[in-house]
Image: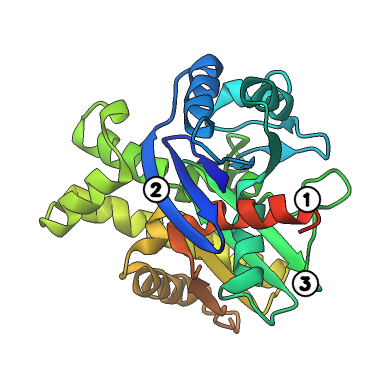
Amino acid sequence: MYLAIDLGGTYIKRAFFEQGNWFAHEQIKTPATKRELLALISSWAGRDGTKGIAVSSPGTVTKHGSIEGTSAIPYIHEGHLLQEIERATGLSVSIENDACCAALAEVWKGNGVDCKDVAVIVIGTGIGGALIKDGQLHRGFDLLGGELGYTLLSIDPVQRTAVPFSEMASASAIARRYATWTGQPGDRLTASDVFAAYEAGDHAAKKAIDAFYFCLAAGIHNVHYVYNPEKILLGGGISARDDLLDGVRHAYMQLKDQLSDYTLHMPRFERCHFQGNANLIGAMHHFMQQQGQ
C-alpha cells in the first residue's frame, strides 16, 4: 500500500493506492506551517502496511527533491522537503511538480494516451503547467519548461506593469475579483463560493466567472500558438465542472472576434480525464517509475 499526497495552496489531498485500487480519499485545508504538514503526513503514513509516499507539489522540483521557485505554500521552498518527509516517516518518498504529475497521469491512462505532444494547464490556487514532448516530460534547460503560470497575460507598456497567467486565470483570481467587486474580505472566499453565487444568479459572480473564462481562453490561445500540441488538457479542481469547456469555448469566440484581422485556429482542448485526482495518480506513477516498478 502506498500513500499519494497532492499539496495545494488551499487544500491538501491524500489517497492510498494498493493493487491498482484507490481508497480513503480525503481533502483538508493546507497546514499553515511545515511542522504541521510533516505531522499530518506522518499520521497518514502511520497506517499499517504503508510502503512509500508519492507527493505532488507546486514549485520547481529538482532531481534531489528540493523545491525551488515560489508557490502558494511558501514553507515548502525552505530546506529539503523530500528528506524531511523521509526523516519524519521512515519511508521512501518521491516528489514531482503538480502539473507534471497531472501530465504523467494523462499520458499514462488518461486523455493524453497515444498523444506525442500534450500541454496540461492545472487550474488551482495558481496556474500550473506541463509539456509532454514526444511522449516525455519536457523540463527545459533550467527546469522551467511548461511553467505556464509564469507567462504574462497582461502588460501595460506605459505603467511598465505586468500580470502573469497565475494571477489572471486561477481559482484564487476568481475569488479575488469577486471580493473586490463586492467589498468582501478576500480571505474568506473560495472559487467554489463564487460559482455557487453565480448559479444563484449573483451578477458580480457572473462577471467574475466570465472574466475567469476569458483569461483562461487567452492563456490557452498562447499555449496553442507557441507549442501547438495535439491536445491541451485542463486539470485542477475546477476541471470537474461540467460547464468548463462550454465557458472556455464561448470566451475563445469572444477573443476571436477581437482578433478579427487574424485567421485563428480553434485549439483542441479537453478536461483531464482524472480531473481533480490527476495529481495524485501522476504522483503515484512517478513514484513507481523512480522505484523501477
**Residue contact between numbered discs 3 and 2, judged by CB atoms under 8 Å:** no
Which residue does the numbered mark 1 point to in the structure image? Answer: 291
Which residue does the numbered mark 2 point to in the structure image? Answer: 24
Which residue does the numbered mark 3 point to in the structure image? Answer: 135
Q: Callout 1 environment at 10 Å: few (<14), some (14 to 19), or many (20+)?
A: few
- Name the residue type under label 2: Ala
State how the image is colored.
Answer: rainbow
Residue 45 quadrant: top right
Residue 215 can be seen, yes or no: no
- Name the residue type under label 1: Gln
- Left/right of residue 100 with respect to residue 23 in the rendered view: right
User: Which structural element holds mark 2?
Assistant: strand
Residue 283 x %, y %: 62, 51
Residue 94 quadrant: top right
What separation in Å lies between label 3 and label 2 (alpha carbons)?
Answer: 31 Å
Between 177 and 235, the residue placed more toward the observer is: 235
**Residue contact between numbered discs 3 and 1, judged by CB atoms under 8 Å:** no
160 vs 217: above or below: above
- Left/right of residue 114 with respect to residue 72 in the rendered view: right
- Name the residue type under label 3: Gly
- For marks 3 and 1, the one nearer the N-term is 3
Task: Give the residue drawn at x 48%, y 33%.
Answer: 44
Residue 238 x %, y %: 38, 56
What separation in Å lies between label 1 and label 2 (alpha carbons)?
Answer: 23 Å
Residue 286 x %, y %: 70, 53
